[in-house]
Image (cartoon, rainbow, N blue to C red):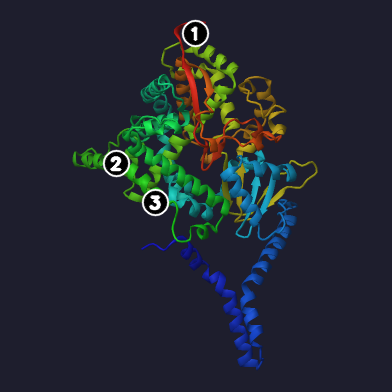
Amino acid sequence: MAIPPGPRYLFSLLPFLLGPPTVVYAGLRLADARLGLVVPTWTTVAAVVLARPVLSIFQRYYTRYKDRGAAAANDAFIVPHVEEKRPNFGGLSIMSALVKDLKTGYPGDMMLTWMEKYGPVFQLRLISDNRIVTFEPDHIKAILATQFDAFDKGPILYMQFHSLLGTGVFNSDGDMWKFHRSMTRPFFSKERITHFDIFEAHADNALKQATDRLAEGFAIDFQDLVSRFTLDSATEFLFGHDVQSLSAGIPYPRAYAHLDTETFKKHPSNEFVDAFLRSQNQTAVRTRVGPTWPLAEFWGDKIKADREVLDRFSNPILVEALRKKDLEKDAGADGDYGDSLLSHLVHHTQDINVLKDELVNLLVAGRDTTGCTLTYAFYMLSEHPEVVERLRQEILEKVGPTNRPTYDNLREMKYLRAFINEVLRLYPPVPFDSRMSSKATVWTSKVPGSKPYYIPANTRVLYGVFNMHRRTDLWGPDALEFDPNRFLDERLHKYLTPNPYIFCPFNAGPRICLGQQFAYHESSFFIIRLLQQFTNFRLAPDAQPPESKPPSSWAETNRPKAREKIMPGTHLTMYVKGGLWVRMDPLKPEVEVV
């Protein structure tokens, strides 16, 4: 029977907790026996009880002293730290602010407050660990590319994510990461990602269901719709097995939930989606709490049951792949690995846990990231009708009113690519990420006359492209405005061309997203089909769950959240809390004529 997280964590701390008191007690007893030094009982008790706290305080300040010395030796500065609110104790108020920001706040809002005070790089000193946070493109470039060997996922992040992602590609370092990477890379070649039959079948299915539901007079949850589209597309492309989540249908608004069919309610894909959301939210909470997260899940891993749901969902896919492998072996065709990534995986490892982990990791990549992009793309279409008209004009010119887009069409559609880039800039699917420094290093400082920053070894480093993508000093005074033209006009050459790391929606360096072009193609294809069939895109606030509407206090601020009409949320990726409930009108044939 597995030991619960809390007791297991405390057991791992026993040497840390009991070592100093044991040494102090043994020392006092030895002094009494050898030297005849009589120590009062109260003194012994006090010394034993205080041994660990005193040593921890000493180690904490001694580490800071050593870091200052190492920084001076490198002619560098220590990263400024966030001053904690009073009363302060071990960063608890900072940790509380991070968790609150995650659950009820606007993504990165607390970070933005600290950035305005301390600059784009600062340090969070917590009782469990120290964390350096950066929104500086030079530092992100160092983490992802130029100093790649100095930054790993690290053991802390591994343990926080392990219940959900196991040893998959997003939660591994070293040889295991190289194994996953080498297996995945060949499946994102130009020949594979330009085969649009998969996109067409699932996009047509999704938009047909949207048409039917809108014809009934109901709003639709666009986030749910595109998440099913991307899930079915990803499983067919990567695993050769379409899970047919669209066959469940799409949900009715909450007030009409009684109309949801039993097929919808009991469909395995719905159970999967609910478990996926819960497990990602809980994983995000763990990252805010830090290494002490097991204490918050003392008697049970809160992700374990949901991961079992995910495995039950993906198990038929894995069983079928293994069955095909055995048939191929019996037929003497063991060298023919088939066309899917999963068929290759089962020929290269027999570890069932590795296979299950990779399926979950690939579902995160294949479903959530592109689903996020399409969700926020619709949000921006609803807010910017002038963008809709320019996109429609380009579609009519390059593709036509009903034709299926081709690879060459997508290459020619500069404004569509600029539109998707602008969505990715303001609403990047992975808004925040982190690494662990495996060795001490130095980062440059943009502050005039400032020395570089010293980054100690074994320090967790967080970087946030969400905030970086919105910096006016990097993108210009209109950085908070949604304007696809910034990727086409003189602003492109003024800001992005000389400093490409100010735009990192897909990461960069050796761990850059291999599915980047696949995601662009999938998003582009769906958007084209959407605009070929619909117009008058708008939000449906009457269908939006009340608790997922932005609080009135947001509008009273001078922050980016003041202009939001939905509540962005974030766990491993971005999403819209409560779903994105929308309406749109079928596009009449005469509207298609230029």
Furthest residue to the right? 449
Where disc 1 sits, the SS reads helix
Q: Is residue 236 left or right of residue 96?
A: left
Q: Residue at x 51, y 31 (%)?
A: 544
The answer to whether the residue labelled 2 contacts the one labelled 3, judged by CB atoms less than 8 Å apart, is no
Q: Position of residue 255 (x, y in %)?
A: 45, 32
Amino acid carrying mark 3 in the image:
Ala
Give the CA separation, mark 1 to mark 2.
45 Å
Is 390 placed above or below 293 here?
A: above
Amino acid carrying mark 2 in the image:
Pro
Amino acid carrying mark 1 in the image:
Val
Q: Residue at x 31, y 42 (%)?
A: 318
Where disc 3 sits, the SS reads helix
Q: Position of residue 539 (x, y in %)?
A: 53, 25
Between residue 320 and residue 586, name the one nearer to us.
586
Q: Which mark is residue 305?
A: 3
Q: Quadrant of residue 323?
A: top left
Look at mark 2 in the image and give the residue it sits on: 316
Q: Quadrant of residue 55?
A: bottom right
Give the CA separation, mark 2 to mark 3.
18 Å
Look at mark 1 in the image and give the residue it sits on: 591
Q: Is residue 153 left or right of residue 501?
A: left
Q: Earlier in the sequence, mark 1 or mark 2?
A: 2
Where disc 2 sits, the SS reads helix
Q: Residues within 10 Å of mark 2 (few under 14, many from 20)?
A: few
The answer to whether the residue labelled 1 contacts the one labelled 3, judged by CB atoms less than 8 Å apart, is no
Q: Position of residue 53 (x, y in %)?
A: 64, 70
Between residue 285 and residue 260, name the one nearer to us.
260
